[in-house]
Amino acid sequence: MAKLQVILDGAVIDEFRLTRGRITIGRRRYSDILLDNPAVSGDHALIERIGRDVYLEDRDSTNGTKLNGKPVRRQVLRFGDEIGIAHYALRYCNDDAPAQPGFEHTLMMKEIRPGGGRVDTRPQAEAAVASRNPASILGPLGVLHVLTGPNAGRELKLVKNLTTLGKAGTQVAVVTRRAEGYFLSHVEGAQCPRINGREVGTQPCALQAGDQIEFMGVSMIFDHQIEPAGKPAGG
């Protein structure tokens, strides 16, 4: 299966399996591959499968799209090609391409397979990601507290723009981090996640502190990370 690895500052921060005929890339919230950076246009680029060929197309973006370092309008992709959009590189590859270290930090670690869905950033890349992401400045960091299942008692800090929950190819939901907060949406599979007992569809649903999420038999509580209070003046 073909996929795109999203790379920032040399670290693979996300992976997307190309399971549909058209994949949109941009800054708009409904983009299939969301790159939340001011240098990325709302509708920046498109990946399209026609027959056995896969094409990259720039959608008249403001800052342009590059393929292997050269500006491109529309071009057939080959495994190993790198797409350049703003600060990001998107590597076109197949499932044989290795996942990066830090894979064990995903929430559903026993469900996700290498090359499926989106995977976590390596710890040393988190600061670099935050520095490129305006949402990390505008809002508090979100956390999922796992209540049930094999990972009960653990917490997942939502430091990325996109955090995937579930099993790629079976059941997938995604938590998206934006300047206005965190959103949960259903990606694939017959089982939709629930927030406080209410089923969530493909449209992003805003998360509030204290919301209970149920997905794949696992219950989680969404909250904001509380920063340590500073020392009182004169103390």
Image (tube, rainbow, N blue to C red):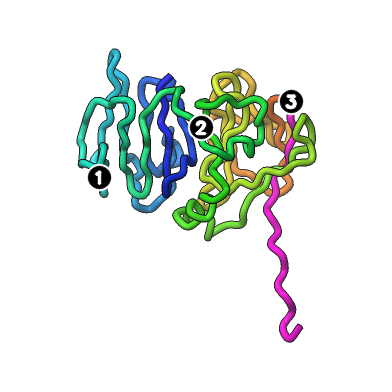
Query: Seen in the image, is 89 located left or right of residue 214?
Result: left
**Which residue is painted at 36% across and 41% down in the image?**
89
Circle 1: element type: loop
* Quadrant in the picture for residue 90: top left
* Quadrant in the picture for residue 202: top right
Upstream in sequence: badge 1 or badge 3: 1
**Which residue is painted at 63% across and 35% down in the image?**
104
Q: Main secondary structure of the magenta part?
A: loop
Q: Is residue 227 magenta?
A: yes
Relative depth, front residue between 92 and 140: 92
- The reply to whether dot 2 and dot 3 touch (C-beta < 8 Å) is no
Residue type (three-letter) at the residue carrying disc 2: Ala
Q: Position of residue 210 (x, y in %)?
A: 73, 46
Circle 3: element type: loop
- Relative vertical location of residue 69 with respect to residue 76 in this rendering, above or below: below
Which residue is under mark 3? 217
Q: Position of residue 1 (x, y in %)?
A: 43, 19
Q: Position of residue 37 (x, y in %)?
A: 41, 50
Which residue is under mark 2? 99
Query: Distance of mark 2 from mark 1, alpha carbons?
Result: 28 Å
Which residue is under mark 1? 64
Residue type (three-letter) at the residue carrying disc 3: Gly
Query: Distance of mark 2 from mark 3, alpha carbons?
Result: 26 Å
- The reply to whether dot 2 and dot 1 touch (C-beta < 8 Å) is no
Query: Distance of mark 1 from mark 3, alpha carbons?
Result: 43 Å
On residue 11, the disc is: none
